[in-house]
């Protein structure tokens, strides 16, 4: 018990000492933040190629949370990206003989014919000059999708999963129109335009 108390005093004293030091670091100017015109609220429309051969479309709205980013050394921005996707595909397995319920039916995302994805991610946008931006993203998705129960009957399932991915934008038309491509799990590859 005495060790914990002594450790707490050392940590507290170190914290007080560190906070009492004068700040000697000055901020340096950051890239072309104001001049490039590509920061700010973005609306994105895209096509989706999901895992398990699902095709679809979706949209996102990206809202800057920290427009000036985390550091003065980079032209960056931290944003919340919310939106959704609809994916669907149906095909028949010609070798299906009907002996196994649910087997051989069409399937899209997670073995269903359709799926609706709501997505919320945090994106750290890194601007490389006036034309290129790259971003990692992490977040959460909730999927409502077609599935089969244990007896092979059609059912509707709800699944929540973490999202992780990377993407880039090529800003080709001033000031804000950009080609965007993103690959993430579990939604898939998304290609579209940002306005």
Image (cartoon, rainbow, N blue to C red):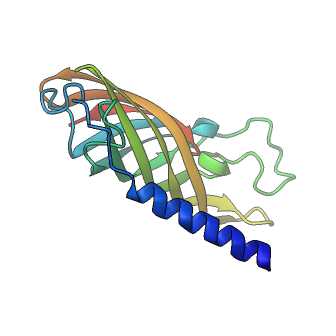
- 91 and 2: which is toward the camera: 2
Residue 20: percent from the left, percent from the top?
39, 58
Q: Is residue 58 left or right of residue 7?
A: left
Is residue 86 visible in the rendered image? The answer is yes
Judge whether 45 appears above or below 115 on screen: above
Can you tell which quarter of the image residue 8 is in?
bottom right
Horizontally, residue 111 falls left or right of residue 2, namely: left
Expressed as whole percent of the image width and height from the top left, the position of residue 122 reads: 43, 50
Q: Which residue occupies the extreme bottom position in the image?
A: 1
Q: Residue at x 67, y 40 (%)?
A: 92
Which quarter of the rendering shows the C terminus? top left
Give coordinates of residue 49: x percent, y percent: 50, 34
Q: Residue at x 34, y 32 (%)?
A: 192
Depicted 95 relative to depicted 7: above or below: above
Can you say which quadrant of the picture contains the N terminus? bottom right
Q: Residue at x 61, y 62 (%)?
A: 159
Q: Is 179 located above or below residue 144 in the figure?
A: above
**Residue 156 visible in rendering:** no
Residue found at the very far right of the displayed protein = 99
In the image, residue 142 above or below residue 38: below
State the image quarter where residue 190 is shown.
top left
């Amino acid at each position: 018990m005495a060790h914990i108390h002594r450790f707490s005093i050392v940590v507290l004293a170190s914290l007080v000492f560190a906070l009492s030091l004068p700040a000697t670091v000055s901020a340096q100017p950051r890239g072309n933040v104001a001049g490039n015109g590509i920061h700010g609220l973005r609306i994105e429309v895209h096509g989706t190629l999901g895992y398990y051969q699902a095709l679809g479309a979706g949209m996102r709205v990206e809202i800057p949370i920290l427009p000036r980013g985390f550091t003065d050394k980079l032209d960056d921005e931290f944003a919340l990206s919310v939106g959704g996707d609809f994916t669907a595909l149906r095909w028949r397995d010609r070798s299906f003989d009907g002996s196994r319920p649910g087997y051989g039916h069409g399937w899209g995302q997670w073995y269903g014919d359709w799926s609706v994805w709501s997505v919320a991610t945090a994106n750290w946008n890194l601007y490389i000059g006036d034309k290129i931006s790259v971003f990692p993203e992490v977040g959460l998705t909730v999927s409502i999708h077609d599935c089969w129960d244990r007896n092979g009957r059609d059912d509707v399932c709800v699944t929540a999963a973490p999202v992780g991915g990377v993407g880039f934008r090529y800003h080709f038309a001033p000031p804000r129109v950009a080609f965007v491509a993103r690959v993430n799990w579990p939604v898939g590859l998304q290609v579209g335009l940002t306005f």
